[in-house]
Image (cartoon, grey):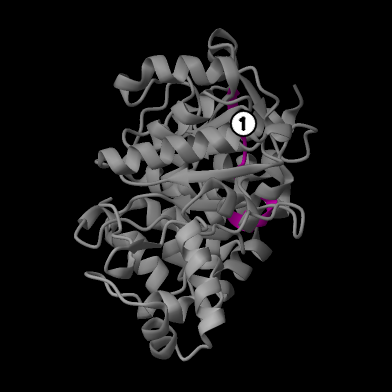
């Protein structure tokens, strides 16, 4: 393993995931150079000047940032982290490696410095045709079923489902994806060897067997509240589009959707009952035209798939016998009494048709079960109850 990769392992202990200042420092001076700056406690002169100009930062702001990194230097031990990675059966991938998904580069300064992977699937290949499915942790039975159904169909058709491994919609999406033939990718807010939530331990084992667990944090890292929101940018960036199945107004799923929109990825939402608070976030996305309404997996594939190559079939109502009637036949049908009966001449006058035409239409209506002849005359056949 080269020095740059080891430096990135060290920086993963020093800086929080998504730290844009660290991202720019690494881009300007390399990972080893950035680590040397932190150890020395000095900003490169030109870099510091550029940072102050970029956001109007004061010198004290930059110094506090540097000191916060330096405070974590005692945690840095790349050899220990590599050993833990090996014990967990995990591996690392960094920008520029053959296994690095280049769509993550769209994150710019917030691009992950390094990713830990645990699972049998080929990560970069799995993410080429992928879609994120996210939503509420406290989902309804409706939301869980929709998420599982969408994920299962997508997986059967060769699409990788990406989600965050949480309770609720995330878990339902992963389970649905595992029922198909494509891998599923789970982006964690903790180390890949930390089963969080613990109730999903068996699910994570299944994902490792048929997909990949992914994290920006080193092995053993515990989850933190802020990291859940930060990791959402990775979920959005890995995927061609994000589907929000069920989300309240204040929901991390909407944060993922916002990241997807910022990255010019497709955003879709599934509508729910207007009385459900857990669908209020989806409805707001739709009302503000921030998402496309989808109700079937085929509609989602049409949205995120190849233009002209993944079109969803047009959903049509079933064709009924009355749909094939000509305008004249409809007029004869309207002229038929519901009770009693009427003679052909009376019906022809009411329909405004010659008697011969009315008789012909009466014969057709009788054949398709819409009219019948009684001793009192012709009448409409009653419609059976549904």
Image quadrant where one finds the N terminus: top right
Residue 92 lies, in percent from the top left, at 65, 26
Q: Is residue 71 visible?
A: no
Which residue was labeled with disc 1? 156
Q: Which residue occupies the foreground of this view, 152 or 343? A: 343
Question: Callout 1: 10 Å neighbours few (<14), some, many (20+)?
Answer: some
Q: Is residue 107 magenta?
A: yes
Residue at position x 45%, y 20% in the image = 204
Residue at position x 56%, y 75% in the image = 326
In this view, 89 is above or below 97: above
Q: Which residue occupies the foreground of this view, 275 or 204? A: 275
In this view, 363 is above or below 199: below
Left-right relation of 255 to 338? right
Q: Which residue occupies the foreground of this view, 7 or 313? A: 313
Residue 271 lies, in percent from the top left, at 37, 58
Residue at position x 52%, y 23% in the image = 179
Image-quadrant location for residue 11:
top right
Left-right relation of 304 to 38? right
Residue 244 lies, in percent from the top left, at 43, 52
């Amino acid at each position: 393993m080269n020095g740059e990769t080891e430096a990135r392992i060290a920086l993963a202990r020093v800086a929080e995931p998504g730290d844009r200042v660290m991202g720019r420092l690494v881009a300007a001076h390399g990972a080893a150079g950035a680590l040397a700056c932190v150890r020395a406690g000095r900003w490169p002169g030109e870099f510091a000047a550029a940072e102050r100009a970029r956001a109007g930062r004061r010198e004290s702001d930059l110094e506090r940032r540097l000191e916060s990194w330096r405070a974590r230097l005692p945690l840095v031990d790349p050899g220990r982290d590599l050993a833990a990675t090996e014990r967990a059966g995990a591996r690392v991938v960094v920008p520029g490696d053959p296994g690095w998904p280049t769509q993550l580069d769209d994150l710019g300064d917030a691009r992950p410095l390094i990713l830990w992977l645990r699972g049998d699937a080929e990560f970069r290949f799995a993410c080429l045709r992928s879609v994120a499915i996210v939503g509420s942790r406290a989902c309804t039975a409706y939301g869980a079923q929709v998420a599982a159904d969408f994920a299962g169909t997508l997986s059967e058709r060769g699409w990788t489902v990406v989600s965050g491994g949480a309770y609720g919609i995330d878990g339902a999406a992963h389970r649905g994806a595992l029922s198909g033939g494509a891998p599923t990718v789970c982006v964690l807010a903790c180390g890949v060897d930390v089963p969080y939530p613990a109730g999903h331990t068996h699910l994570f084992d299944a994902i490792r067997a048929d997909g990949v667990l992914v994290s920006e944090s080193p092995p053993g890292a515990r989850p933190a509240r802020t990291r859940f929101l930060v990791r959402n940018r990775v979920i959005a960036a890995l995927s061609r589009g994000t589907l929000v199945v069920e989300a309240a107004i204040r929901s991390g799923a909407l944060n993922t959707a916002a990241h997807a929109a910022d990255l010019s990825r497709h955003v879709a939402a599934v509508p729910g009952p207007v009385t459900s608070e857990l669908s209020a976030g989806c409805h707001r996305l739709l009302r503000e035209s921030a998402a496309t309404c989808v109700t079937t997996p085929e509609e989602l594939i049409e949205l995120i798939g190849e233009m002209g190559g993944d079109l969803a079939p047009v959903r049509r109502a079933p064709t009924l016998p009355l749909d094939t009637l000509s305008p004249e036949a409809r007029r004869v049908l309207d002229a038929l009494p519901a009770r009693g009966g009427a003679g052909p001449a009376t019906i022809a006058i009411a329909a405004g048709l010659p008697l011969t035409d009315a008789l012909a239409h009466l014969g057709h209506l009788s054949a398709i079960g819409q009219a019948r002849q009684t001793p009192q005359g012709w009448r409409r056949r009653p419609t059976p109850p549904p």
